[in-house]
Image (tube, helix red, strand yellow):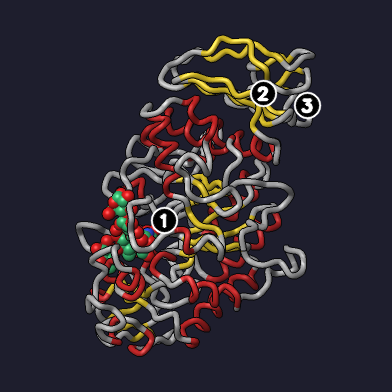
Amino acid sequence: YKNPNTAGGRTAMVHLFEWPWRSIARECEDFLGPHSFGGVQISPPHEHRILYDTNIQRPWYEAYQPVSYKLVSRRGNRAEFIDMVQRCNNAGVRIYVDAVVNHMCGGDAGVGKGYGDSAYDTDAYAFAEVPYDISHFNVPQGYEQCPTGGPINTYNSAQIVRNCNLEGLLDLDHSQGYVRDRIVDYFNDVINIGVAGFRVDASKHMWPDNIQAIFDMTDNLNTAYFPGNTRPFFYQEVIDQDTGEAVTAAEYINIARVTDFIYGREVSETFKGYKSLDSLSSFGIHWGVKISDETAVVFIDNHDNQRGHGGGGNVLMYKNQEDYKLAIAFMLSWPHGFPRIMSSYKFDQQWTGPPADNDWNTEEPTFNADGSCVSTDSYGWVCEHRWRGIKNMVEWRNQAGTEPVQNFWGDYSRLAFSRGNRAFIAIGRGGSSINERLQTGLPSGEYCNMAVVDYDSSARSCTGHSTVNVDSSGYADISISGNSGDNLLFIHVGASK
Ligand code: AAO
């Protein structure tokens, strides 16, 4: 379950948070496929509760309150979902579903209908479309099952964390075959449509044995897009900041991949200047990061911690533009874990939903002539994945392949290294300049500095004037001014003149 099932050596994914399915389909064809992105984590596709009040309006987090497993949500209907999966796979880009199966909607929902008109009654624990009834939930089974009688009020007891309600969300009992079957039906439905894998939301709040049993009952991937007998990719959302809680990431690493929240915290703190950049030469499993290369999904920020949910708040994000770009570039350069790039929309309040018209129809992203997304200072899609320094580092990572880190050079605010003889990167933080003759590891040639220009493969030329000349012994003059965003330089063997 640890293989991301990407096509043709692609090595990174992007989370297109809250993007509608039709926009993702188009993005796969126009941008992600041509720029060699491996996959997209989509926001939850199942039917959810509709949340609205005049204060929070239509918050993004209604998506995390399932009402049924029908494929209808604010982001699109079943036909649009199928179309997206087909078009993305045809563009060489995989779809990973954000699966919310720990719980159904909040107990505060009462009686109502979800986005696809399915009825629920949370007082009766009734979800008509699935169907679930009161016998399928943990809390109604009494204090022996959930010792608090309702909420998760401590992270010091595994039983409370896993059998009580997270944020008031009605907690399913996954020890029951019936509950497992409904979840497996949902997983197999989207597997048969052609998805490549799943982010499993709130895995920390599910018992590892139950998760394993559910994964083991899933179908192999659709052979229209994948080789026979290919297992789905699973990555489990487990927040473990090494604070001594009862539930740890270590309990999940033998099942499938696990999200590593220490990675983003450590890289963010380093690029904020709390630690020296050259200390990153030993970055990885021995550095404080707990989850190994082949088991980790790594990221700098996610949709929770960039807005202070999920115990977040200290990580870099798009609002810290330059330091953030460098942190992402470092993540993509370093051979550890399967990286996820966050692609955000602008927000003022932590609950603010995606850009939308007056009827809450999500607006499609639109693009400037330079490929960036159209936005104002406070509103619109950010599209970090389209920033040149980020999009071209995705290709850099693919080109670096499995080559090791070599030729490491650095000091407090600067670093440079190569990945074998295939790719080279230099970073200067906080206005630091670099003017050094450094070993790049690369064959001699004139390479495009992909932090600043793009590569035109048909003309074998750079789209601007920034190039790096590597001599016959691998050395080159590396220069970064440190002024106005000139803080990154990277070259690879796929982009030379
Ligand atoms: C909303 C409302 C609620 C309402 C509910 C029902 O906000 O007031 O009761 O609806 O109507 C998202 C939103 C929630 C939202 C929910 C449903 O974030 O606000 O609730 O949708 O609409 C824990 C979980 C983790 C979870 C995270 C948010 O372990 O799985 O909380 N993330 C996922 C999704 C998230 C989603 C859900 C799960 C639910 O990514 O978007 O919620 O589907 C500690 C623990 C963590 C824990 C945090 C937060 O963290 O370790 O496990 O995350 O607390 O409570 C330091 C530590 C750090 C610690 C932190 C806080 O930083 O290092 O480890 O302190 O103590």
Tell me if I can see residue 223 in this picture.
Answer: yes
Ligand 1, seen in the image, is in the quarter at bottom left
Question: Of 423 and 78, which appears nearest the observer?
Answer: 423
Question: Of 431 and 65, which appears nearest the observer?
Answer: 431
Choose mark 1 or mark 3, whichever is in front.
Answer: 3
Residue 362 - label: 1
| Label whose residue precedes the other's in the sequence (1 or 3) | 1
Residue 463 - label: 2
Neighbour tally class for label 2: few under 14, some 14-19, many 20 plus, Cα within 10 Å = some
The correct choice, above or below, for 394 with respect to 360 in the image is: above
Neighbour tally class for label 1: few under 14, some 14-19, many 20 plus, Cα within 10 Å = some
Distance, label 1 to label 2, CA atoms, is 34 Å
Residue 459 - label: 3
Q: In which quarter of the image is residue 79?
A: bottom right
Q: Residue at x 42, y 17 (%)?
A: 431
Neighbour tally class for label 3: few under 14, some 14-19, many 20 plus, Cα within 10 Å = few
Residue 6 in percent (x, y) is at 67, 54
Q: In which quarter of the image is residue 320?
A: top left
Residue at the limit of the structure toward the left, as seen here: 55
Q: In which quarter of the image is residue 470?
A: top right
